[in-house]
Amino acid sequence: MSGQPPHAVPVPQGYRVGHWEVREPLGSGAFATVYAGRPAGEADPALPRRAALKFLPTGTRTPRQLRHLRELADREVELLGRLRAPRLIRMHETLTVDDPDHPELDGATVIVLERAEGSLDAVLERDPTPDSGPALLAQVCEGLHQLHHAGWVHGDLKPANVLLMKDGSVRLADFNMAAELEGTHAYAPAFATPDYTPPELLWPEVDERGTRIRPTADIWAFGVLAHVVLTGEFPLPGGTTEGRVDAATRYAGGTDELRLSPELPEGWREIITDCLARTHAERTTAAALLPRVTKAAGVATPARLPRLRPRFWQRRPVLMATLTLALLITTTSAVSAYRHVTTDDGTPVYAALPRELAFPTNARGEVVYGYHRCPSDSVCFFSEHNGNGDMCVWQGDDPDWQSGKDTCGWAAGAPVRSIFNNIDDTREESAVAYFRGTGFSPPTRTADAWPSAPGAAR
Ligand SMILES: Nc1ncnc2c1ncn2[C@@H]1O[C@H](COP(=O)(O)OP(=O)(O)OP(=O)(O)O)[C@@H](O)[C@H]1O
């Protein structure tokens, strides 16, 4: 952790906060330091076994810094508290350090997050153009769409804020610049990272509510990110950030043309050009972008192929949804969609789904999500793909979905097409098992192994 940014928070290993014990540092940004965390000795056994503890030093600064940091922390907590979607990192709880003996920590806000394996930044450090790049970008685009669809702008999309989970799926993270849309735009503290900032926000007009930003700011950032991931280079020329900012200004002013790398794989040039349109009004939307990005990602190697065999364990809490129906399941990868069918001898088989079935679109060709309807600590089943259509919500230990407390009328006669495991517990045994037939048969599948929503479950 050398060369830490000014607001990084040093926390000793073994330090206790709430029910958590701080372990090794996972990463540091401009405002916060993130540590691995595990439940402290006598902690509630229901806690996840591993978490990420994001320390924001809200307690030990000058009043002006304090206000700013408090605002950043509030933004992140507000978004994470209200928004849960398959491609967004999840928050378990927030804590405030109460420790006058450690004035440098006293008052700090700690956001307890589900723990990722690492960031896209780290992946790119090892391999500037990873084979899994297109598949990762498709998932980032999904995340962006889920965020915009719920009415928020990220405001700081970049490789360090794209996290990779153990199963290879992607989560967008770091929402301290995020802002909720009020009509066509939102107010954010600033657009944080110059290389990913659209030209109109390089010298923005700032009023007392902050900078006016639109979802198209994230689209620009996505265009830059896609170029970086696919070619290892920024789309605008220049050996330094200042040089690239100047190039962006010349491009936006019409003096220079956009010259994307000749290395760009087939299908991506038009997408990136549309993301990097000169003005926000000319840029595309995440909803329109997603089907194009998914198509361009094609059959390229996904981040890691999802497991396609059932896992035969079932421990608490287990959903025993006896669904007498055929489940249409898409997998964690945005580019790999599978249909689950059972052969006569009961063997599960997976067949590729036609793309239009896996990613249904509205009349404008935009993918629409409905996962945000699923309450926390629930497993939701939907009659349509991507969290759309009728929804059944399962919570607790209800043993049977047809005769238990939580019944699901429509599922008795219609297929379940997407599932979102929104249980706030990352322990492996909390994965949900569900069954297609009566009597808890045929063998279980877990929402962990086959989230039917792209990336729906942990
Ligand atoms: N949930 C997580 N699991 C694992 N690592 C994480 C997690 N959240 C963050 N990190 C690591 O910590 C780094 C810093 O986190 P984050 O970006 O949230 O901090 P920040 O100070 O708000 O950053 P920024 O400078 O972008 O505003 C990330 O780049 C990542 O490497």
Image (cartoon, rainbow, N blue to C red):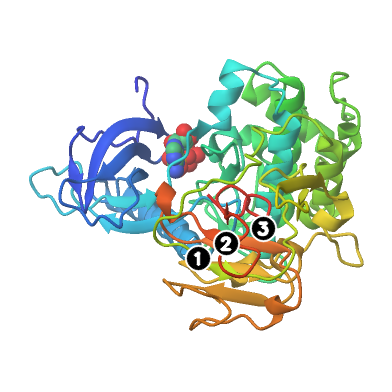
Residue 166 to residue 363: above or below? above
Q: Earlier in the sequence, mark 2 or mark 3?
A: 3
The nearer-to-camera label among 1 and 3 is 1
Q: Is residue 352 visible?
A: yes
What residue occupies the far front of the structure in this picture?
345
Residue 46 to residue 408: above or below? above
Rendered image quadrant of residue 159: top right
The front one of 426 and 249 is 426
Count of marks, rendered view? 3
Numbered circle sitting on residue 434: 2
Packing grade of label 2 (10 A; few <14, some 14-19, many >=20) is: many
On the image, numbered disc 3 is attached to which residue?
146
Q: Residue at x 76, y 33 (%)?
A: 134
Numbered circle sitting on residue 255: none
Question: What percent of the width, then of the height, locates residue 180?
Answer: 59, 64
Numbered circle sitting on residue 319: 1
Mark 1 and mark 2 in contact (Cβ < 8 Å)?
Answer: yes
* Secondary element at tag 1: loop
How much space separates mark 2 and mark 1, taking CA atoms?
6 Å
The front one of 77 and 64 is 77
How much space separates mark 1 and mark 3, taking CA atoms?
26 Å
Q: Residue at x 66, y 46 (%)?
A: 332
Hey, what amino acid is under mark 1?
Answer: Leu
* Secondary element at tag 3: helix
* Secondary element at tag 2: strand
Question: What percent of the width, then of the height, locates residue 239?
Answer: 68, 16
Packing grade of label 1 (10 A; few <14, some 14-19, many >=20) is: many
Hey, what amino acid is under mark 2?
Answer: Tyr
